[in-house]
Amino acid sequence: MPELPEVETIRRDLVPRVVGRSFSAVQLLWPRAVRQPSPEEFRRRLSGQKIESIERRGKYLIFHLSSGQALILHLRMSGWLHLAPSGSPPELYCRNTFIMDDGSQIQFCDRRKLGTIWLVADPAEVVGKLGPDPLEQHFTPKLLKERLHKRSAPIKAVLCDQEVISGVGNMYADEALFQAKIHPLKKAGDLSFQEITKLHKSIRKVLQTALRQRGASIADYKDALGRPGTAQLAFAVAHQRGKNCPVCGTSIQRIPVRNRGTYFCPVCQKLS
């Protein structure tokens, strides 16, 4: 699933290439992706709109438009956006295509057909309940402590709850917990402030490193220019079951945590 580094990489690819351009047409090959308004109304209202800016909130991309409306995209499990020149054929798994005023295209590709699209007057209708972004300045150890306070769920599950922290998912939660030496099953509310401080630092470090590596290509993800990310090449535990821990040499294990496959080192991340 594209998480914060992957979505932010796509946003950064799009900004210099499409901000200032206008939508001339939309081809909805998979109209069920449009949640609001109806597909017919979506096409009509988006036509002629100019992209003023592109923002990311958690795993959502928000295109702020000249009409004051917002086009919001969520890539879900297997989506990515592909920038293509005028006249390009659809990319593999292309479900919907946004055609710009110069003929260039933003192709919404999605193997599993789970991605979602909204066109709304107020972005808060879609992203209003998201938790703080871990790369923003106001995300401090104190704030993280407040978000985890009295939560009895496993810390891995809480980190993946987008209403607690936005943008972190399976891969980077596993990597952050490994760096902080915290077992994924430990109750979030039982973490000491020292552990929370270490976790805060590791979350930011893991995400910033993945951003420099342009995200992780475990399965479907590509950046907007069609290139895979390389963050997965440096993963210590995520998707590394059976391989040796880079710190102690113990075999990496995989367990389910609230129905999420979770990777960790049983020696470096002991459950106290």
Image: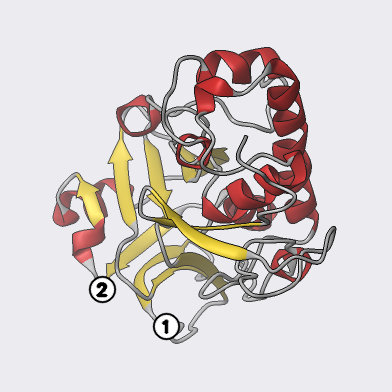
Does dot 1 land on a helix, a strand or a loop? loop
Image location (x, y in percent) of residue 122? 34, 26
- Asked if residue 234 shows in the view, the reply is yes
Image location (x, y in percent) of residue 253? 59, 64
Scheme by which the image is coloured: secondary structure
Q: Is residue 94 above or below residue 166?
A: below
Residue type marked 1: Pro
| In the displayed structure image, the side of residue 204 where residue 49 appears, left or right | left
| In the displayed structure image, the side of residue 58 where residue 9 appears, left or right | right
The residue at 52%/77% (across/down) is 86
Label 1: how many residues lie within 10 Å, few (<14), some (14-19) or many (20+)?
Answer: some
Task: Kindly identify which residue carries mark 1.
Answer: 90
Q: Nearer the viewer, residue 218 or 188?
A: 188
Q: Quadrant of residue 102?
A: bottom right
Residue type marked 2: Leu
Q: Is residue 243 above or below residue 1?
A: below
In three-dimensional space, the C-alpha distance between marks 1 and 2, rounded to whole angstroms, equals 10 Å
The numbered mark at residue 29 is: 2
Q: Nearer the viewer, residue 170 or 255?
A: 255
Q: Is residue 115 above or below residue 166?
A: below
Image location (x, y in percent) of residue 97? 38, 69
Question: Which residue in the rendered view is the most extreme toward the right?
Answer: 247
Image location (x, y in percent) of residue 27? 30, 69
The residue at 39%/44% (across/down) is 72
Q: Quadrant of residue 34?
A: bottom left
- Asked if residue 1 shows in the view, the reply is no
